[in-house]
Image (tube, rainbow, N blue to C red):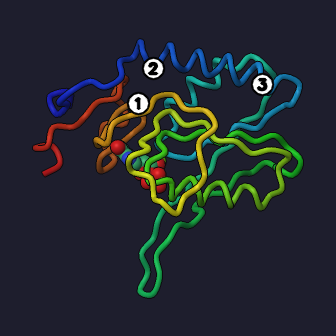
Amino acid sequence: MTNDIKEVLLTEEQIKAKVKELGRQLSREYAGKDPVFVGVLKGVVLFFADMIRQIDIPCQIDFMWISSYKGANSSGMEVRRDVSADLKGRHVVILEDIFDTGNSLDFTYQHLLSKEPASLKICTLLDKPERRNPKVTLQPDYVGFVTPNEFVVGYGLDFNEHYRNLPYVGVLKPEAYE
Ligand code: IMP
Ligand code: MG
């Protein structure tokens, strides 16, 4: 599996340090607000589990699962599994693995906004601004790392559902996906 990696972009140590920093920041900014952290499955699982352990204030966790579909007449995004908590009046932070074109986070954001939270922010491990859909004006509020326009795997991110278990973020060799 590691033979398929061309280059390690973010080491375990770099990720760990960044997660600690983001955890401190969120703990400070959400103190006394009992926030709900909503993870978007599946890519976020490793980041989510590490982040939540760096939050040292009372909080709640929840999950959503969305997927894109292509029907005969339309295509778009759908909610496969919705959050279970009532988000009305709550301070909500979406945790995501990557903000790429922004399409899926835009969808997730609008979906959660309709539940009338008191506030709604986005924390993403990776941001790939070069790939942004120009129609998406939404911006992530908390970013771990800005990454170059390359397809990355590991630390939850997949290619064909593989490589999620790598403890670091790396760039795949072209022969691994060709
Ligand atoms: P979006 O393009 O911002 O809507 O991102 C959609 C989803 O594509 C993300 O949540 C990831 O699951 C996946 N994705 C985007 N870029 C990458 C990448 O470089 N590696 C692995 N998955 C990616
Ligand atoms: Mg994802």
Q: Crowding near pointer 1: few (<14 within 10 Å), some, many (20+)?
A: many
Q: Secondary structure at mark 2?
A: helix
Residue 153 horizontal side relative to residue 117, left or right: left
Is ligand 1 less than 8 Å from the beta carbon at label 3?
no
Quadrant in which residue 124 is drawn: top right
Q: Residue at x 51, y 38 (%)?
A: 44
Q: Are marks 3 and 1 in contact (CB under 8 Å)?
A: no
Q: Label 1, on which residue?
A: 155
The kind of residue tagged 2 is Ile
Camera-nearest residue between 66 and 100:
100
Amino acid carrying label 3: it is Glu
| Residue to which mark 2 is pinned | 15
Q: Is residue 175 above or below residue 24?
A: below
Location of residue 114 in the rendering, given as x and y in whole percent from the top left corner? 77, 61
Dot placed on the residue nearer the N-terminal end, 3 or 2: 2
Q: Circle 2: is it few (<14), some (14-19), or many (20+) Cα within 10 Å?
A: many
Query: Which one is nearer the viewer's eye here, 161 or 175?
Result: 175
Left or right: where 83 falls relative to 17:
right
Q: Is mark 1 within 8 Å of ligand 1?
A: no
First in sequence: mark 2 vs mark 1 = 2
Q: Is residue 121 above or below residue 14?
A: below
- In the depicted view, which residue is nearer to us: 38 or 133? 133
Q: Mark 2 and mark 1 in contact? Answer it, CB < 8 Å.
A: yes
* Relative depth, front residue between 53 and 9: 9
Residue annotated with mark 3: 29
Residue type marked 1: Tyr
Percent position of residue 24, x then y? 67, 16
Who comes first in sequence, dot 3 or dot 1?
3
Mark 3 and mark 2: Cα distance apart in space? 21 Å
